[in-house]
Amino acid sequence: MSDNVNTIKPADFLKLDKSKLTFVDLREPDDVLVHKINGTQNIPFSRFTKNIDEISKGKPVYLICSVGDLSEEVAEILTDRGYEAYSIEGGYKAYSEALKSKPVYIDAKKLRCPGPIVKTADIIRKLPLEQHIIVEATEDAFVSDIAVWCERTGNKLIRLDTANGVITAEIEKCSAPAEKVSEVQNDKTFIVFSGDLDKTIAAFIIANGAASMGRKVTMFFTFWGLNILRKPKKVKVSKTLIEKMFGTMMPRGSLKLGLSRMNMLGAGSKMIRAIMKQKGVSSLEELIRDAISHGVRIVACQMSMDIMGIKREELIDGVELGGVATFLGSAEKSDTSLFI
């Protein structure tokens, strides 16, 4: 290596303000296509002498190639021509390892849905490809949300674990193929917003029908719909005064739901249940059990739970917690989305 060549270690390069430099990628187009580096000016080494004038002298120039040898040659040439040029030691291979060994930390603890996902997306958007990110959150719904978000955005979820109430996700930023993100399947997605007996029966009848056709079904329960998933018996959990008031005023479980029309102080719902039994129609409770046993995904919106003071321990078995990313991830793969 010539004494005229300035070099920089990848870890030190990653600390620099990229707006104050010119980053030139000397790799051939095929290599760049497979392992793209955002924010670079691609001038392949094979055509460098013809395109050298495209590089501005207004900023320091940092060069990267596959293993570091070609970038040293070009750095020497540019230095002789009056540029402030640097070769990144070890090339792309070392640069990639540096991204993985020094992950970016995102503190999303105490944030509520969709806060953790939004903060993660905002920060990752600005990072280079293959950068590793560590996200810590405390909302249970984050477990589902971050997995779905990674799947739908094309980023790689390397690990996801929980310890001492903190959920930790390690993510590698990847480029997402457009065709994968826009892919639509025959899945079905429901937002169950209402807590009315008749609307709930209709929702579960359709969900069970879709499941019987081999479709993947996700039912996302939010606000008043959460009451459907409450256990019928009171569960001892710690609540504030307002949360206790909410719990007292709202129906506890599917057996307490009223009709949206002609409820008549509960007489209407009893009549509907009696007619359903007489006609051989499965009860709502049977429909719920059938849905869960046939793989229908039952998701409770944690943000709504927090607002309404409903605790996880109060929900029936088979329910998972999720947030907006969980719903949208399912909806994007669905050809039918219903708001009930």
Image (cartoon, rainbow, N blue to C red):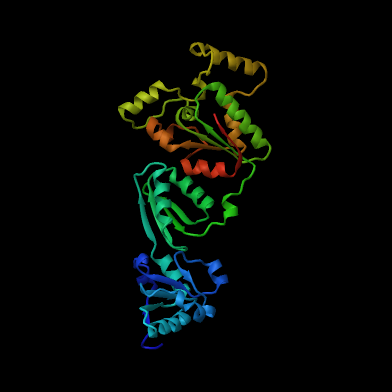
- The quarter of the rendered structure image containing the C terminus is top right
Q: Position of 209 compared to 12: left or right?
A: right
- Location of residue 162 with respect to 89 vertically, above or below: above
Q: Position of 2 compared to 218: left or right?
A: left
At a point 35% along the width and 71% down the height, the residue shown is 12
Residue with the most extreme bottom position: 2
The answer to whether residue 167 of the structure is visible from this angle is no
The answer to whether residue 237 of the structure is visible from this angle is yes
- The quarter of the rendered structure image containing the N terminus is bottom left
Which is more toward the observer, 217 or 71? 71
Residue with the most extreme front position: 53
- In the rendered image, residue 119, in percent from the top left (x then y), is placed at 39, 49
Which is more toward the observer, 203 or 231? 203
- In the rendered image, residue 73, in percent from the top left (x then y), is placed at 45, 84
Which is more toward the observer, 41 or 120? 41
Which is more toward the observer, 242 or 174? 174
At a point 47% along the width and 82% down the height, the residue shown is 69
- Location of residue 10 with respect to 137 vertically, above or below: below
Residue with the most extreme left position: 241
